[in-house]
Amino acid sequence: MAWAQDSESRVLLVRQTAGQKLWTLPGGKVRPRESLEGALLREVLEETGLRVQADAWIDIMDRPDRGAIMVLYAVTVLDVSPVLAKRLSKEISQVRYSLKLPKDASPSATYFWKRMKTDVSVG
């Protein structure tokens, strides 16, 4: 998952089209023989149309109920143009920067948001 902030400290969020249509941080599953960083760059581009640079991983969330581990990376957005609606994937209905986490946010987005926004020491 990507933690991308703009110059106003707003965080990049995406809204899922499936299930409960939750807001979450951009990111997704790693394909076989794909690196974590490669998957991150691919998923952010697919979901937002933005190219990013992975700066460093900053936190991990264990999701045994889903058989998954969520890794949060700090990223820098390389594109200067705003997110374009025409670039959305079939998995994502909206992309926006936000100062507040929406109430209908995914568990992983909620977990990472609380950790990042309360300056809890991670690592």
Image (spheres, rainbow, N blue to C red):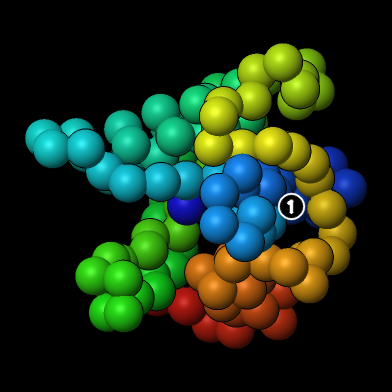
Residue drawn 70% across the image and 81% down it: 118
* Rendered position, 11 above or below 51: below
- Residue that label 1 marks: 11
Numbered-mark total: 1
- Residue 81 visible? The answer is yes
Residue drawn 64% across the image and 25% down it: 88
Pick the quarter of the image with the C terminus.
bottom left
State which quadrant residue 93 falls in.
top right
* Rendered position, 37 above or below 1: above
Q: Residue furthest left?
A: 33
Residue drawn 61% across the image and 47% down it: 16
- Residue 6 visible? The answer is no
Q: Residue furthest front?
A: 19
74, 30: nearer the viewer: 30
Question: At which x and y percent is residue 103?
Answer: 78, 72
Residue type at tag 1:
Val
* Rendered position, 40 above or below 21: above
What kind of element bears circle 1?
strand
Neighbours of disc 1 within 10 Å: few (<14), some (14-19), many (20+): some
Residue drawn 80% across the image and 65% down it: 102
Question: At which x and y percent is residue 64?
Answer: 27, 79
Q: Is residue 115 left or right of residue 7?
A: left
Q: Is residue 41 left or right of residue 120?
A: left
Question: At which x and y percent is residue 69?
Answer: 30, 67
Question: At which x and y percent is residue 77?
Answer: 63, 31
Q: Is residue 7 left or right of residue 53?
A: right
